[in-house]
Image (cartoon, rainbow, N blue to C red):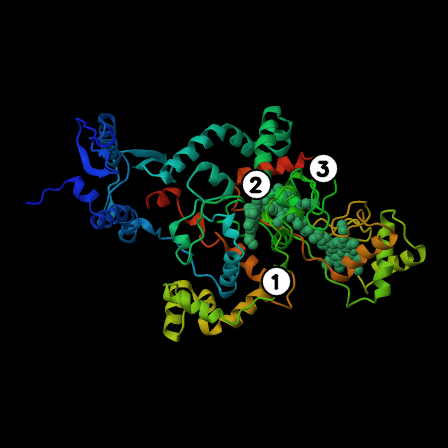
Amino acid sequence: MFKFKHENLETNAGILLVATMLAISIGGLVEIAPLFMIDSTMEKVDGVRPYTPLEQRGRDIYIREGCYTCHSQMIRPFRDEQLRYGHYSLASESKYDHPFQWGSKRTGPDLARVGGKYSNEWHVQHLIKPTSVVPESVMPNYPWLLTTPLNYADIGDRMRALRITGVPYSANAEEYQRNVAQFGEAVAKTLHIPDAQKNLVAQAQEGNYDGDRTNVTEMDALVAYLQVLGTMVDFRQYKPEDLVKYR
Amino acid sequence: MANETPRTSVQTTGHVWDGDLQEYNNPLPAWWIYGFYITVAFAVIYWIIYPSWPFGKGFLPGVNSITYVNAEGKEESWHWNTRAKLLKETQDAAAIQKPYYDKIASLSYEQISKDPELSSFVLSAGKAIFSDNCAPCHQAGGQGKIGHFPNLTDDDWLYGGSFDKIHESILKGRRGYMPPFAEALEPAQIDALAHYVLSLSGQKAEPAKAAEGNKLFHSQTAACYYCHGDDAKGRPIIGSANLTDKVWLWADVPGARDDAARVAAVRQVIANGLNRGVMPAWEGRLKPEQIKLLTVYVHELGGGK
């Protein structure tokens, strides 16, 4: 009968390889896989919706410019973080983020709830030249955002790609109706792929994020994105202990 | 000597390199083995105390629990987790600050600013809240930034410097609006108005142009008086600036090099209008007692009325 000895493992490269992989994958199997099964992973809260086309393009620019190399988007449940940044982040708040921007590198502050904290005008000024409003800032200047027209020709494709990952953008009348039921009509309209370009331009003009209504710049998109971060859930609706019980 | 294989009493792995190099096959030292067993035991104890193994649609919650006060004011326990711990810590810290915040909530603004113990609390707590939320715009000391954000340390207020008005500014936010006049008025008229506006605060201006500007200011054509008042001192209700003092927010008069640049700065404001003065509302983001505390803090920055 085969008797297991450590020597068998150590002297057989093939078996050692398989066993090592098994040992490592236990970490993932035990820590990640159950999250898909456990009921309470996703908090049941209202308000979380996919990004509008303009916000989604802003998010793409956020990633392109590498803002995540200095900013996290995940307020941990610690008192110092809560005092500075606001309510801790919920898992369900990033359910439509692909990929999520949680991160752990914080050269700058966490941005998970920066939406509504400042005016559009502040963001524009700050992105063009951070030291002009925060003299001690080490954040780089991004002046080209204001002068570069936003390329939104492919916004439909981008939304279709996200749809494959499970973001409920609607491609047809049936999916649109499903969104009306889930998010209400006003939001459902912004999630409809055939109208994406029209909606994007309309939001940029209405929001006037970069202070100039006549064109749609990358600044419009990025500021629209920053201004929605962390604003979707109205925490006044929930008692603190309700959220405690999801963990 | 060279050909002799070294003899050892311990077991070797059996390999021989270079004729004499061998590898011992010793068991692990006892301290290591027992250290390993201790970590295994530690893990088992940890599983029992803290949330650990997943099963089905849930997980083992662990026997450790945390007791906090729920929204109904009753004590409630839940298995240990970081959210429960945070809630508890927040409540403990609030209990320590409670005497102060209770006093702040119950006392009038004047009483708070006169109470020495409270005002030093306002100063330290207010400074922290101000740095995190207000300083990026109004700057660390509240001195503001010409062209963007008003100075909160002087006694010149757009919306009023009383406790109540400051409170309203912070709670509800503010948004100043002045229409652009580039299309409604001729360039010469805007020029005249700029000279008049400068003359109001004793800056150098051409008297003839200023006189014409004066007429325009109070006419139906430009109707500046409608928002800025007959005396041009501004109307706090809409935050229209006082044009008779030397404090400027949008027209960078103090920073201008010469008379021509001063006129140009004012002309630019009149021609393009103003829609940039957006002060966010803090209701909902900050707690009522924090806003009250900030009100006193801002009032005491130097310019409160």
Question: Between residues B95 and A89, which one lies in front from this camera angle?
Answer: A89
Q: In which quadrant is the N terminus of chain A drawn?
A: top left
Instruction: Label 2, secondary structure: give it.
Output: helix
Q: Is residue B131 left or right of residue A13?
A: right
Q: Chain of mark 1?
A: A
How far is the residue under mark 3 from the one under mark 2?
21 Å
**Three-letter code, disc 1:** Asn
Q: 10 Å neighbourhood of mark 3: few (<14), some, or many (≥20)?
A: some
Q: How far across and how far down the image is residue B139, in percent?
A: 66, 42
Side (left or right) of B83 relative to B181: left
Q: Which mark is residue B132?
A: 2
Looking at the image, residue A105 lies above or below residue B34: below
Where residue B269 sits: x, y (%)? 76, 57
| Label of residue B303 in the image | 3
Q: Chain of mark 2?
A: B
> For the residues marked 3 and 1, what is the alpha-carbon distance in whole angstroms?
34 Å
Distance from label 2 to label 1 (Cα)?
A: 26 Å
The residue to which callout 1 is attached is A208
Q: Residues within 10 Å of mark 2 (few under 14, many from 20)?
A: few
A167 displayed left or right of B60: right
Residue furthest top as drawn: B116
Numbered-mark total: 3
Q: Using the image, name the chain to which the residue with label 3 belongs.
A: B
The answer to whether tags 2 and 1 share a subunit is: no
